[in-house]
Structures are given as C-alpha cells and as structure tokens.
Image (cartoon, rainbow, N blue to C red):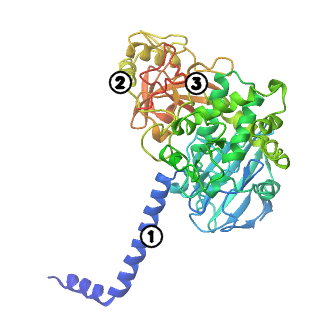
C-alpha cells in the first residue's frame, strides 16, 4: 500500500463524522427530488393542500395559507415587473386561475420554467402566466385542458429568482399573441372575494378523483348529451349550472344510499336525503323507476335532466337560471343559486363545447383501471395497421391536396393510412378542421394528454381546438410520421416537428365509416 493511499484513508478516518453528515444531506436531497418526481408523475388533480377556493370561476393560484405576497406588479429596480410574486415553500401547489388551454409549458428565458394558460373570460381572450417552477414542478403539457383550481405545478426557485415563489401574470389579449400585461392584484381579489360555499364534493368521506379530469369529463358528457338531443346552448348551460351547484360536477355516491357506493363514482357524500349523481337526483323521485346502476350513470343523469327540462312550459325561451331552478325545485330563497353559477357554466360550455363529441358514455375515475379511465380507450389493431401503412409511405413527396398512393399532403396521408388499415371501410375527412368543417379534429375520441398517446393516434397542430392547420400520426417513442410541408417528403420527426399541439385523437376499432364514434359505440375495453 502506497504512502498516498495510507494518507487518504487516514484523512477519511479523521473526518468521518463530517463525511457522514454530507452523505446524509445528499441522501435527503435525493429523496426529496425523487418524491417531487413521483408527485409530478402521479399527480391526479389538486392534492397536497387541497384545491384553491373558487369564486366566480376564478381560483387563487396557490395555497393562501402557505404563501404571501412578496413583490407587486410595477416598476422594480428600474425595470418593469409584469407580475405579482407569491412567496412560499418550495413544492407548494400551483393552481390554474381559470379554465382554459395550456398554450406553453416548460423552459422559458428568465422564468426557468413557465406555464401559460389561455382563457376566454366574458368573451375576451386572456392569458395567465406561472413562473419559476423546477423541471419536475411543471405538471401539465402544451395542449392540456385545465379547470379553475386544478393543480398545474409546484412552486420553485428556478431562473431569475431569489427565493422560492410563484411569479403570476395576467395578460389581456393573450401572452403569446401580442397582448398587454395587467396588474394581477384586482384579479387575485376576484378569486378571493367570495369563496363558494362548500358543495357536497368538498364534504366527501371518500377521496374524489381530483380536479384534473373529472370536472372536464362530466362537463363534456353533459354537453355531448345536449348536442345529441339538439338542446339550445342556454339549456346546456342550465344543466352545467345545476351540476356545479349540486355536486361541483362530481358523480357522487351517497352514504344515504349505501348501494350507490358499489358503482363507479367520484366520491361519497355524507348523505342528503337519497340524492346521488352529478345532478343529485333523488332515488325516491327522479330515479325511482330505475336500478341504482342506471341512476349512477352520468349520461343517464344528463338525459333525465333534459327530460325534465322538456316538461317545463316555454323551456326553449326560458332564462337558463330560472329553468334550472324550475327543474330542481329548491326552496324559494335558494332559486338564485343556479343563476349565480351561470358564468362558470358558460365558460365550461365555451371551453369544452367543440370537443365534447364522444364524451357521453365515458365513466371512471382518474388514476384507476377499468371502464373509462380516459376519454379514449386503448388503441386497437386498426391503429397498428394504420401506423404500418403510413410508415410504408416514407420518402413519398408532399403535394398539396394529394391523398396517395404516390404523393400526399398532411391530412391526405392520415386518410390514406386508415383507408388501408380498414380495408377501405373508414374514410377520414381529407381536412384538418375548422369551426365550419371540423374535419379530423372531430374523428374518433380525444386523447387527454401526450403521456396517454399510443401508436396510431393522430395529433393536430397550430391553431386552436376548433381550427388546425397540420396533422401527424404518432408512432411511439415521442415520434410522428407526417407529410410535413412542400419540398419535404413523408418523414419521421419528434412530436414537436409538427408545431404546437392543439388536439390529439384516437380512432378505435369500432369507429364508423367517417371515423367518428357515436353514443353507445365508445370502445370501453
């Protein structure tokens, strides 16, 4: 053994206590990081402190009890500080201020990471911005739909930041489309002026599914049933307002109806007479003629609400708040509670109306296995064959308007691949889609987020959920095959090679000839 080696071991022995302390700190840090990674990977809605209280459709963007304002909007050290800082412990939950679409999520200059959410508020475009999260503190992806109070991130200390905090901005006209920044303070006051009285969903004795998917899912089911029944928008809004008031859009079982707990639900209420479901329909009246399994089906519940609507005199022309009260028949002093939630209902209708087709009939709970975990069931043999067909066309030239077999444009390639996969039985629209012609934006069923993508799913890009200008097919491992642009042959690129994702769709084996899935046809395997 050399002198240097002996000296090294003597050094370790003399400083063993300090070295042990350093190793302990590193172990704790690693454990904390793993815990944050796991929280980011498994998060299923507003947990870890509970969802932010909402008022008028707005939610305070973090836990008020764990944070405090540290730096307001305005001039600071000679430069404009375009947001409000809310200081709090690293890892404190961040909540979406209002319902909307994630326009960007990830690295951003100065922010370390940011999340930008686009909203429509009182008919006008707005964005909210959330900054300084660590990489594992960004819990949403571009294109995700979010609801007010949904957990979207964790407070960090990334980028140009001196101490853990949330940097929160509000932009009129949109952050990524040349809008104008506003002082967030008045908006934050709106989120905290009058928190809503705790609805049954906040008094659950069993855990609910959280806010990530359930609110959107139940809203989309109500809207989809309304669309299929050709209900006017204000009647659909009345149904949404009832769901908000009665259950906070949760399909609730009840301790007063013990057998209801045996069926898929979003939580168990302590017991209010014999009411169950999204609309809190009573077993002794509204659902007296059906079994409990049917009564716990959100689609049946929505149809029953619309049945009662059609029994009301002059229902087509009725004020939606009054119509809701006429159907639900609360005490006279409580009739106004449905009108009070109508602004939120209208926001839900605007947010999810164009993407609701196919949602009816989907049940289940976030993070559980079985029927209806996601708006889209697993991809089948049709999708696998479509991938093989599309991949066989690599190298073929891009020609606008072409749909094979010797050249393609983007939607033409997707149409050709599914024609081949189905033996000519399924012909998708040769169009990406817009508000007048939804095209491929409306085929199949929606995939809720990128982590749920499976080979054969189609990804639509650039625009909005009602208008897209490009489409590609997911082939796995973060890659897509597409006819990208003039002068470029059909090729494989990362998902980002198509642009900004606005919608993802899955074509199940039982899709109709036009690629659409109708009520009762949803693949629930």
Question: Relative to residue 447, is residue 338 depicted above or below?
Answer: below
- Report which residue position mark 1 lands on: 29
- Report which residue position mark 2 lands on: 381
The single residue placed furthest to the bottom in the displayed view is 14
Name the image quarter holding the C terminus.
Answer: top left
Label placed on residue 423:
none
Name the image quarter holding the N terminus.
Answer: bottom left
Nearer the camera: disc 3 or disc 2: 2
Image position of 415 (left or right of 66): left
Marks 3,1: beta carbons within 8 A: no
Judge the density around disc 3: few (<14), some (14-19), many (≥20) Cα neighbours within 10 Å.
many
Residue 65: x percent and y percent?
Answer: 68, 68
Per the image, label 2 sits on a secondary structure element best described as helix
Marks 3,2: beta carbons within 8 A: no
Question: Relative to residue 353, is residue 344 depicted above or below?
Answer: below
- Report which residue position mark 3 lands on: 441
Per the image, label 1 sits on a secondary structure element best described as helix
Residue at horizontal 44 percent and vertical 19 percent from the top: 489
> Along the polypeptide, which appears first: circle 3 or circle 2?
2
């Amino acid at each position: 053994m050399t002198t240097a080696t002996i000296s090294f071991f003597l050094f370790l022995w003399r400083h063993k206590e300090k070295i042990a302390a350093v190793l302990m700190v590193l172990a704790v840090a690693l454990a904390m990081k793993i815990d944050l990674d796991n929280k980011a990977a498994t998060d299923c809605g507003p947990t870890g402190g509970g969802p932010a209280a909402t008022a008028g459709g707005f939610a305070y963007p973090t836990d008020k009890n764990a944070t405090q304002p540290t730096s307001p909007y305005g001039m600071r050290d000679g430069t404009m500080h375009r947001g409000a800082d809310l200081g709090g412990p690293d890892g404190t939950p961040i909540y979406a201020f209002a319902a909307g679409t994630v326009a960007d999520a990830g690295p951003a200059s100065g922010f370390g990471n940011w999340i930008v959410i686009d909203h429509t508020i009182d008919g006008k475009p707005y964005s909210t911005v959330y900054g300084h999260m660590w990489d594992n503190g960004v819990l949403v992806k571009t294109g995700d739909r979010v609801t007010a109070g949904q957990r979207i991130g964790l407070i960090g200390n990334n980028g140009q930041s001196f101490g853990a905090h949330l940097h929160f901005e509000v932009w009129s006209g949109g952050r990524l489309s040349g809008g104008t920044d506003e002082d967030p303070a008045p908006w934050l006051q709106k989120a905290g002026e009058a928190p809503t009285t705790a609805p049954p969903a906040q008094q659950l004795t069993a855990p609910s599914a959280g806010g990530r998917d359930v609110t959107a899912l139940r809203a989309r089911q109500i809207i989809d049933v309304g669309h299929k029944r050709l209900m006017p928008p204000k009647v659909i809004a009345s149904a949404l307002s009832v769901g908000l008031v009665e259950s906070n859009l949760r399909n609730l079982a009840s301790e007063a109806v013990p057998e209801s707990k045996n069926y898929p639900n979003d939580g168990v209420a302590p017991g209010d007479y014999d009411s169950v479901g999204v609309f809190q329909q009573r077993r002794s009246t509204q659902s007296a003629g059906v079994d409990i399994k049917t009564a716990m089906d959100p689609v049946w519940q929505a149809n029953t609400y619309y049945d009662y609507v059609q029994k009301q005199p002059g229902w087509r022309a009725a004020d939606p708040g009054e119509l809701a009260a006429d159907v639900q028949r609360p005490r006279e002093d409580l009739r106004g509670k449905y009108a009070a939630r109508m602004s939120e209902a209208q926001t839900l209708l605007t947010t999810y109306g164009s993407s609701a087709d196919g949602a009816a009939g989907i049940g289940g709970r976030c993070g559980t296995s079985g029927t209806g975990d996601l708006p889209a069931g697993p991809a089948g043999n049709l999708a696998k064959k479509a991938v093989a067909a599309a991949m066989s066309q690599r190298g073929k030239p891009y020609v606008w308007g072409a749909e094979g077999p010797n050249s393609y444009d983007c939607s033409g390639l997707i149409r050709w691949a599914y024609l081949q996969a189905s033996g000519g039985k399924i012909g998708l629209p040769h169009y990406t889609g817009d508000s007048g012609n939804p095209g491929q934006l409306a085929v199949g069923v929606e995939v809720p987020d990128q982590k749920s993508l499976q080979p054969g799913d189609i990804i639509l890009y650039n625009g909005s959920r009602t208008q897209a200008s490009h489409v590609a097919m997911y082939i796995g491992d973060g890659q897509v095959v597409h006819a990208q642009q003039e002068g470029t042959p059909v090729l494989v690129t990362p998902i980002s090679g198509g642009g900004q994702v606005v919608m993802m769709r899955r074509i199940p084996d039982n899709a109709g000839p036009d690629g659409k899935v109708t009520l009762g046809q949803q693949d629930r395997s």
